[in-house]
Amino acid sequence: MSMFTVVIPTLDRAETLAHTLKSCTIQGGDDFEVLVSDNLSVDNTAEVLAHFQKLEPRLRVVRPRRRLGQATHWEFALGHAQPGFVMVLGADDALLPHCMERARKALERFPDAKVLSSTAGILYFYPNAGGKESGQLNLIDQGERMEVRSSREGLSKLLNADCRVTDLPYPYGCAWMHTSLLDRVRSQTGRLIPCRTPPVFLTLACLAYTDDYVHVDPGFACPGVSAKSIGYSAQHAHGDRERDKEFFEESNIEEKDIAFHPLVGDSRAEHIHVAETLLMAQEAGVLPREPAIPWTKFIALAYRDFQRGEWSERDQKSNLESLQRVSKNMGCGDIIERALELGDISRWKQTLGFTLLEFTIDGASVQMDTTPMKLEGVHEAAHLADTLLQARVESINGRAISTMNLPAEYFLRWLLSSLDGNRTLRAQYNTRCVESDRRAAERERAKALLAEAKSQIRELRTSRPVRAKSLASRLFRRFRMRKPSSEGDAI
């Protein structure tokens, strides 16, 4: 039996950590463990953890001696995981209720698999996230599938900037990876994460050290975005610039993290993070030196995405300077200068000599505002998302929908009225509601008739006993009840 360990590195996230732990502790099985690494938080994280440790014997807590940088802290946390499969979960993310059932089912079917992947098709924004996405739940219905995919093909796409890193095995909420892969990284590089971007590097390790991986949908987790999410603060136009600055400067970190590559430096662009990780993986010997990284393409993608964001004037200047620096260092400085000269992104794209892909996920996409639902946290968003995905799977497979057990009927009625792309699910739900209402009305009428009959019988018993028996017989026939076996039976 393989062990599954969810590793949760956390730092001052007590207000969301409780929701994350709730989503983990509902998972069944003795082959499952939750490992929280508290990076010396100063809020009430310790109290939250102590509370859950009393309730959940599968929860284990570790702490470093000094506060560590992000990648170093991930390495510390992963180093305490038991042999088996691991997944890193943010302290504002949640496991889906059916997470472990799907993982075990995949491993039963493919017992030699070292990586179990899923589509990054769910994202919940806490109401305090800021920006227009606050309170929003994004959901992409991929249907039900379990298939083997080529690691080499996936790595080739990433090396050519033809896919997002989250389209591949992404062990930050979207994939399980076996600890034997981490052992290979350590033997190759001397440490587990030899770069500044741990989620991207772990994805590369999954692809570099396997021939193939198992892809599963529906997936395993519901990532959350809260006010303290580092990725959102650092890479989003509406992110918290103070947290952005704190992350890059590591002003609250005692043991500083691995430095950015000197030719790249810090950047808010995800595409630059991916390219830098590829470069550092090549230099560490995890990836071969060939093919060469297409820096022109990665920089162009980053520039396009920056132009689409609603960045402040100060942020726009900072973003542009970061791209100018890396493009100059990588020998493709003209790409940004040409964009500035032309001033029109459409004309600039026509001069590139390659196509900038639009990265999308196939499937029915749903965006819902959960603000009226007053969700408690990401664990309830995960319950909502998993319920809808599982119900959709059951409806496609022709089975009765048995998982629609959300706590409030008004909540589900409102939700399904917004799912324009899911007519099958909405129609089935409406049919069930009509039938339920009809039966409820029948029960109420029957109760009223029975109450009236009992009242009449009590009155007739006191004044006309013989007539009461006759009336009782008629009532029994009316309600199709068994007639008394003898004249002496009481009503």
Image (tube, rainbow, N blue to C red):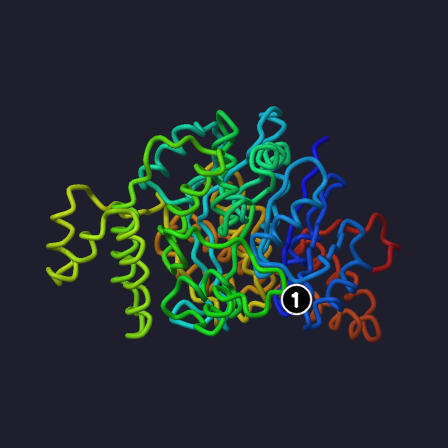
Q: Is residue 484 left or right of residue 218?
A: right
User: What residue is drawn where x is 12% and y is 48%?
Assistant: 351
Amino acid carrying mark 1 in the image: Leu
Q: Work out whether residue 439 can be spotted.
A: no
Q: Where is residue 262 in the image (x, y as percent from the top left)?
A: 41, 52
Quadrant where the image shows the C terminus: bottom right
Residue count near mark 1 (Cα–Cα under 10 Å), binned few <14, some 14–19, many ≥20: some
The residue located at (81%, 51%) in the rendering is: 57
Estimate the x, y position of residue 430 in percent, counting from the top left: 45, 55
Q: Position of residue 458 (x, y in %)?
A: 80, 72
Q: Is residue 325 visible?
A: yes
Circle 1 is placed at which residue position?
449
- Disc 1 is placed on an element classified as helix
Q: Pick the residue in front: 293 or 38.
A: 293
Q: Tell me: residue 474, above or below residue 146.
A: below
Instruction: Please give the count of numbered marks on the rendered protein.
Output: 1
